[in-house]
Amino acid sequence: MRSPGTRAAAAFLLACCALLGRATPGTADATWTTVAPGVTYRAFDVPGLKGPARVHLVAVDLRDPRVTVDLLTPGAVAARAPLSALADARGAVAGVNGDFFHLTETQHPGVEATGAPVGPAIATGHALKAAVPTGQRFGPALPPGTDTREVLGVGVDRRARLGRLTLDGTVSTPDGRLPLGGLDHPVLRAGTPLPGLDPRTATVRSAAGVADGGRRLLLLALDGAPAYRTGLTVAEVAALLDQVGAEDGFSLDGGGSSTLVTRDPGAASVTVRNHPSGGAERPVPNAVGIFSRR
């Protein structure tokens, strides 16, 4: 891996499960609210296999020079903190929880839970950690042909993209090989679903999408309030991302981790927009943070 001082083409990368899907659940009309220059938010309901779901969506215009994206972390690989605390500590105007992490021993009995995220993580061009081997990862099964090296990044060219982290410190994308910058694992590529998406298991979920040729980043989290707690399947989330304009889609950690925050203009702290399914924010190891200069 190249030294942290190397100029990175990717300013932020997070390992994600790529979501790919075209089927479209219906959505209710909703009004966009301006959070900050280049950042908007709306909430709307969609029908799901197990019942209605409420969607909280943030759209980020990466063409706006006042907008930046970075990975939010508590400062140590195995540390965790609520998303609202991570966002407030950095002055973010919006954010969504990030990678799956080692929460319990369920998938690998006898392996003590560390709280560390599964995928590689790089923030502001500095490497924080590598991905765990695919056979040792925690979280739902990856689609066939993908692994923990799949990454979502925003480069210094201000474009979001899906790539793959390789051992020589580069990210391979359809546009070429880029020096390493930041990272997570995948599920929608070029508007086509990856095979093997689960169409039956519904839960509260978070996801990210890349739209407009990488010039727009979409962050969403489902609501965990009792009326909406049945959530959506991965296939339904893929279809939802497609409907709201994403070309590539990425599954983030879900269940009790799903959290989305925005900061009202002039407010000193962010507001949690969805209801976490556990009744309160679950501490998480990292998150996607959105920043905007006024």
Image: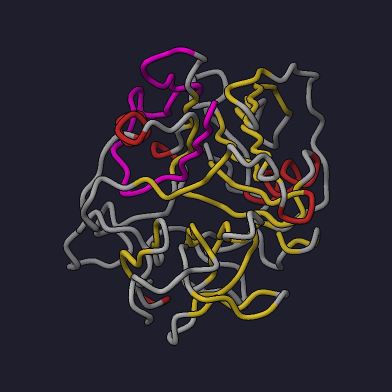
222 drawn magenta:
no
**What residue sits 77% from the left and 38% below the top?**
244
Image quadrant in which the C terminus is located: top right
Vertical order, 150 against 84 (above or below): below
- Front residue of this view, candidates 109 and 23: 23
**What residue sits 68% from the left and 39% below the top?**
61
Image quadrant in which the N terminus is located: bottom left
- Front residue of this view, candidates 123 and 133: 123
**What residue sits 71% from the left and 59% below the top?**
188
289 drawn magenta:
yes
Residue 79 position within the rendered picture, expressed as x and y whole percent measured from the top left? 21, 49
| Secondary structure that dominates the magenta span | loop
Residue 58 falls in which quadrant of the image?
top right
The region drawn magenta spans 266-294
Residue 192 position within the rendered picture, expressed as x and y whole percent measured from the top left? 80, 62
246 vs 116, left or right, is right
**What residue sits 24% from the left and 59% below the top?**
105
147 vs 270, left or right, is right
